[in-house]
């Protein structure tokens, strides 16, 4: 008799940790993901700012699971799930993948939300993928290169102004790193510009930075950001983003135009559209962020064989953080094993909050372990360093990451500064090609789909 087939969608925290938790189970696992790597999203900003290489935070999933004989890894983007016939359909470069499942774990995560203004993405990429981080790296270093070439003062100013929208952990970490890059690392590297004059603006509609960290740590983070030179503008809604800047409307009704070539969007998340597919078929509705309301055991209502974990699920107002996805993935695996071994798990999913951290500057961070234990400064930074080293996947990656951190934090150097023109303009080029852009396995466009009148 064939063993039960567990299909897992996604190779992020929820997907990978559920696959690993099923290592000893008497099942066959297929993990399908639209990327070949397990991405450690919390360190994306370090790839964008030249500290780490993409390989260090995104090891190949195939490699991580190579010794787990009950698991196979497939590259493919899932675009259909049929709950009645228990089928998942994916595609990669016009190749279709059809998978039948006995159990399904959906961990497809979340993308950036532009709150209904998706056209902002062209001018202010988000920070969710390796593509995003490499594009941003090309935009940051590219803006400084163009400023060095410019003889026009106003143009130079806008090339030397960096705007980060969203003062959550990603925005704060990114703004801190860009300012350190400009005000420390690159000060001797240019001749026509003085990078110490670069402006780094951190904007948010909320009245504080890092709201979930509480009043004390928010204030400490703001003070440290300002000390290193980040300009913080709170209570401001971005109303428009275009190629040369953005418009902001403040709570008191005043408006401001900020001229800046390099903008980053680190505000808002939208769960994978697969959530909507699941919700529609099971007669429920996703929440405003597109997340699926799940049962206390993380299953889809009416479908005890389907689990939704991580950033895609909505339960007990749990935050979209790595530990929720990891613990959710492990719990789903435990439930499946319990059912197959005749020892069903009856207790509901309960999340153990290990706390949150954000790095602000070299040797400066904030850490909230719980309401009583809260650190800011060097102690929090040390805790961040240790914890992130533990979670970086792979021995070699830990060693090279530590080496890169030593270079950056002790010396302020950045060794990962390679950028390519394709990283810079790829998104725009794909957008301009429009629906005709459908690459095939041979790497060319389908000739039938090219509008020759346009070219
Ligand atoms: C920049 C950034 C910084 C962060 N910092 C922190 C932090 O400091 N601490 C913290 O705890 N959390 C942090 N988070 C949040 C944390 O990374 C997420 O909560 C976590 O990754 C969620 O795990 P997941 O498995 O649900 O989704 P993800 O890790 O996003 O994984 C989703 C997976 O699904 C795949 N996928 C998506 N759609 C499809 C599809 N249609 N078909 C096939 N595969 C698909 C993706 O390729 C990916 O492999 C951060 C997130 C970001 C973006």
Image: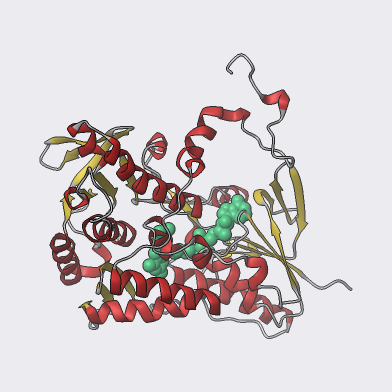
Where is residue 103, by image quadrant? bottom right
Residue 362 position within the rendered picture, expressed as x and y whole percent measured from the top left? 25, 70
Would you place residue 246 above or below residue 274 in this image? Answer: above
Q: Which quadrant of the rendered structure holds the N terminus?
A: bottom right
Residue 290 position within the rendered picture, expressed as x and y whole percent measured from the top left? 47, 50
Q: Residue furthest front?
A: 191
Q: Which quadrant of the rendered structure holds the C terminus?
A: top right
Would you place residue 198 above or below residue 217 in this image? Answer: above
Residue 227 position within the rendered picture, expressed as x and y whole percent measured from the top left? 13, 63
The colour scheme of the drawn protein is secondary structure
Q: In the picture provided, is 214 more to the left or to the right than 129?
A: left
**Of residues 356 and 455, which is closer to you in this image?**
455
Q: Residue furthest top?
A: 453
Task: Using the rendered image of the protein, determine whether residue 369 is visible from the camera's viewpoint.
Answer: no
**Of residues 354 and 395, which is closer to you in this image?**
395
Where is residue 338, by image quadrant? bottom right
Q: Residue at x 32, y 81 (%)?
A: 383
Q: Residue at x 41, y 56 (%)?
A: 417
């Amino acid at each position: 008799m064939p063993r039960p087939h567990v299909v897992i969608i996604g190779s992020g925290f929820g997907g990978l940790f559920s696959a690993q938790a099923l290592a000893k189970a008497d099942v066959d696992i297929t993990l399908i993901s639209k990327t070949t790597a397990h991405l450690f999203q919390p360190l994306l900003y370090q790839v964008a700012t030249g500290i780490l290489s993409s390989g260090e935070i995104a090891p190949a999933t195939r490699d991580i699971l190579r010794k787990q004989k009950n698991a196979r890894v497939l590259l493919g983007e899932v675009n259909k799930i049929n709950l009645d016939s228990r089928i998942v359909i994916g595609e990669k470069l016009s190749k279709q993948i059809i998978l039948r499942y006995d159990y399904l774990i959906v961990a497809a995560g979340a993308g950036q939300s532009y709150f209904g203004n998706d056209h902002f993405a062209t001018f202010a990429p988000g920070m969710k993928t390796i593509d995003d981080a490499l594009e941003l790296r090309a935009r940051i270093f590219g803006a400084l290169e163009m400023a060095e070439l410019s003889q026009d003062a106003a143009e130079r100013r806008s090339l030397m102004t960096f705007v980060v929208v969203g003062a959550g952990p990603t925005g704060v970490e990114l703004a801190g790193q860009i300012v350190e890059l400009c005000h420390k690392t690159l000060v001797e590297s240019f001749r026509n510009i003085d990078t110490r004059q670069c402006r780094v603006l951190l904007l948010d509609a909320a009245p504080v930075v890092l709201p979930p960290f509480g009043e004390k740590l928010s204030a400490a983070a703001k003070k440290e950001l300002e000390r290193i030179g980040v300009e913080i503008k709170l209570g401001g809604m971005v109303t428009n983003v275009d190629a040369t800047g953005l418009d902001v409307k403040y709570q008191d009704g005043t408006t401001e135009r900020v001229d800046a070539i390099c903008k980053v969007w680190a505000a808002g998340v939208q769960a994978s559209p697969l959530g909507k597919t699941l919700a529609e078929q099971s007669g429920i509705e996703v929440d405003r962020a597109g997340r699926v309301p799940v049962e206390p055991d993380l299953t889809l209502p009416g479908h005890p064989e389907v689990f939704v974990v991580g950033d895609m699920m909505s339960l007990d107002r749990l935050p979209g953080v790595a530990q929720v996805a990891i613990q959710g993935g492990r719990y789903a695996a435990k439930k499946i094993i319990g059912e197959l071994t005749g020892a069903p798990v009856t207790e509901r999913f309960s999340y153990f909050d290990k706390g949150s951290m954000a790095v602000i500057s070299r040797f400066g961070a904030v850490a909230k372990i719980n309401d009583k234990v809260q650190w800011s400064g060097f102690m929090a930074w040390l805790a961040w360093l240790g914890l992130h080293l533990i979670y970086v996947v792979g021995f070699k990656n830990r060693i090279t990451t530590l080496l890169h951190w030593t270079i950056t934090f002790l010396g302020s150097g950045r060794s990962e500064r390679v950028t390519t023109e394709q990283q810079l303009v790829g998104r725009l080029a794909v957008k301009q090609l429009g629906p005709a852009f459908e690459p095939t396995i041979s790497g060319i466009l389908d000739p039938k789909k090219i509008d020759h009148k346009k070219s």
